[in-house]
Amino acid sequence: MTKRITLKLNRETRSVEVEPNDILLDVLRDKLGVKSPKIGCERGDCGACTVLLDGKSVRTCLILAIEADGQEITTVEGLSQAGLTPVQQSFLEHGSFQCGFCAPGVVLSATELLGRNPHPSEAEVKEALAGNLCRCTGYKPIIDAVLAVSRKPGRRI
Amino acid sequence: MSIAHQFEYVKPRTLREAVRILARYGTGARALAGGTDLIGLISDGVVAPQAVVDIKGIPGLDRIEFKGGVLSIGALVTFSDLRNSPIIARRFPVIREMTGWLASVGIRNRATLVGNLCSAVPCCDSGAVLLVYDAVVQVAGPAGKRRVSLHDWFVGPRKTVLKRGEIATGVAVPLPKPKHGACFVKLRRYEGEDLAQASVTVLALAGNGYRISFGAVAPRPIAGERIEALLEGEPLSDDLIQKAVRLVPEEIAPITDIRATKEYRAHMVGAMLERGLRAAVARLAGAGPAYGTSLI
């Protein structure tokens, strides 16, 4: 039973045919051509498939594409349309990533946190990023980068 | 790529319609809220429903309300909603404490507390915490509405008393009338997202009343009734705590699994009970560690 769904993907209205058993992550990557959400654990543990759904970070490996009908999705492709955001710039300056596989998810989780709480404590940063696993860095340069943005006064996230 | 199993997807707009659809499919239908548990189960082939009934289109189920001394949490209320709710922070800080150690923000943004109760895994944190409040699950079904005490709700691992065609619409949590303090102690392998190796919840009521529950140390979240009876009416003392800890093996039935051995669980629950009792009683007196402070 194919159904046409319409969603706003990175501020652009997109329409796509899906089956009820299509996973949102696969539809984003294979049918809508957005490759920044990564296929990692496929069970909600690693955070590599994170996107912002109506502004909130979610695991697209645990959402049916059909559930997202009428909703708004932001990926890093959408964040970076006008150049790197301050948090992306900070990750770059801190050398926060090595292989980069976790980076899109980390960027989105950090973006959500700073949008809600512009000056988080270290504990709050760790809580916000606890669901984004990084196997390269040991997390320190990632956490340092988010804290550095939060300490810059008056800067928009 | 998609899930190997095929199913129908329906999104009813009213509770009545949802119940009708669920009743029609019987055991072949599953209600979908956040999906953080269900979608994984379908992907893994553990459950294979004919129909998935998305209840996110039903109005009114996303509310957190406090009226007449009773907290109502609708079936669509997520753990993030609870974590960010001023009502929860003010009236039920131990629920907020629990949400801070539950999964990750990305899961909390989607996973619902009522869904957690319906999943009914033995390590269910929300079920253990709500047991000390004598919470009541609200159920709608073909025969009308009914209310089920959380003490009767869990049958075993992944099993509740929910019948064919029924849907859990919310949970009611009465605020204890006496002054009280509470504490949720969760043992995990590491800081960050992890399921409980064991959990202990303590509610201390003015006048030396105590409510205790345990998670991940029995086939379902359980109340510590023998320990409650031992403590009832007694002011907390070192001697009393030691007596309570000695009763722990009679209350719990832990197993060995990938997260911990049964011996480790049993030993740690004793230590967690001691710390939980001290913290809950201190919080009742307006002192003690701030809610959200990890005690283990």
Image (tube, rainbow, N blue to C red):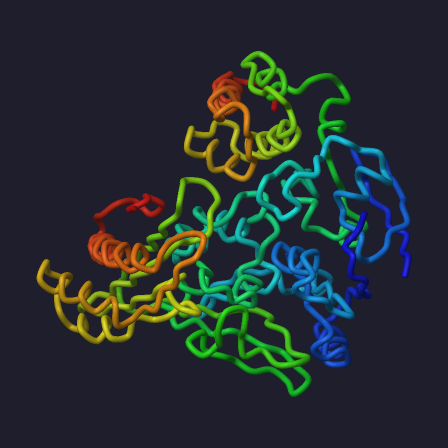
Front-lying residue, B177 or A135: A135
At which x and y percent is residue A127? Answer: 47, 37
Front-lying residue, B247 or B70: B247
Q: Check the image and report above or below for B58 versus B34.
A: below
Q: Check the image and report above or below for A156 versus B289.
A: above
Q: Check the image and report above or below for A156 versus B231.
A: above
Task: Tell me what residue is drawn at x 55 percent, y 30 percent.
Answer: A134
At which x and y percent is residue B222? Answer: 37, 70
Front-lying residue, B185 or A99: A99
Q: Determine which quarter of the picture holds residue A19.
A: bottom right
Q: Seen in the image, is B266 located left or right of residue A75?
A: left
Task: Tell me what residue is drawn at x 28 percent, y 54 percent.
Answer: B268
Task: Tell me what residue is drawn at x 45 percent, y 78 percent.
Answer: B149
At which x and y percent is residue B184? Answer: 34, 55
Determine the residue located farthest toward the bottom in the rendered image: B143
Determine the residue located farthest toward the top in the rendered image: A93
Q: Determine which quarter of the picture holds residue B43.
A: bottom right
At which x and y percent is residue B73? Answer: 53, 63
Q: Seen in the image, is B281 located left or right of residue A87?
A: left
Q: How many marks?
A: 0
Q: Seen in the image, is A61 located left or right of residue A118?
A: right
Front-lying residue, A136 or A103: A136
